[in-house]
Image: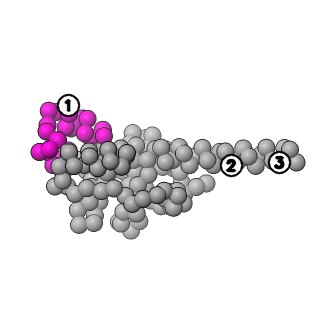
Amino acid sequence: MTTIRQLLTTKAGAVCAVAPEDTVFDAIKKMADKNIGAVVVLEEGRLVGLFTERQYARNVILKGRSSPTTQVRDVMQTEVVCARPQQTVEECMAVMTDKRVRHLPVLEDEQLIGIVSIGDLVKSKIADQEFIIERLVEYVRG
């Protein structure tokens, strides 16, 4: 089974982060530029929140707030569900399903080492299954 640590080694790029005092507009722009659905919120290098497209829709748009004047701290998710590097892809998929989240920051010794999305996990699971299928086909063919 693939662990989150193994999955993170295949992902390119650094974790995209914003500060609590950044504006929602800046966070959304960063997300659009990177084509991602969430950014971690860091304060002095410590994870303090998560800002996602869901938070934007529910806490900014639907509440009539202004993106250029609203700070991320006012709308971010502060109770963040996180993963550990030794967890398996399957364990994290179960957590995401149970907690109804699409992104899991990955912490090791309280330090952020990455983030995984449901898309990352599905992609990993599909790759694992394709590998197994290829091996089975080779076995059957002799």
Marks 2 & 1, CB-CB < 8 Å contact? no
Residue 58 location, x and y as percent? 24, 35
> Could you classify mark 2 by the number of other residues whose Cα lies within 10 Å: few (under 14), some (14-19), or many (20 or more)?
few
Establish if 56 lies above or below 40. above
> Could you classify mark 3 by the number of other residues whose Cα lies within 10 Å: few (under 14), some (14-19), or many (20 or more)?
few
Q: 45 or 66, which lies in front?
A: 66
Q: Residue at x 37, y 58 (%)?
A: 15
Among the two numbered marks 1 and 3 on one chain, the one whose residue lies closer to the N terminus: 1
Helix, strand or loop at label 3? It is helix
Cα–Cα span, label 2 and label 1: 44 Å
Quarter of the image where the N terminus is located: bottom right
In the rendered structure, the answer to whether residue 16 lies left or right of residue 61 reads right
Q: Which residues are drawn in magenta?
A: 53-75
> Could you classify mark 1 by the number of other residues whose Cα lies within 10 Å: few (under 14), some (14-19), or many (20 or more)?
few
Q: Which mark is residue 139?
A: 3
Q: Residue at x 27, y 66 (%)?
A: 45
Residue 44 location, x and y as percent? 23, 66
Q: Residue at x 25, y 56 (%)?
A: 18
Marks 1 & 3, CB-CB < 8 Å contact? no
Establish if 33 lies above or below 17. above
Q: Amino acid at mark 1?
A: Leu
Helix, strand or loop at label 1? It is loop
Q: Residue at x 44, y 52 (%)?
A: 116
Q: Amino acid at mark 2?
A: Phe
Q: Is residue 55 magenta?
A: yes
Judge whether residue 102 can be spotted in this image: yes
Q: 128 or 33, which lies in front?
A: 33
Cα–Cα span, label 2 and label 3: 12 Å
Q: Which mark is residue 62?
A: 1
Q: Amino acid at mark 3?
A: Tyr
Among the two numbered marks 2 and 1 on one chain, the one whose residue lies closer to the N terminus: 1
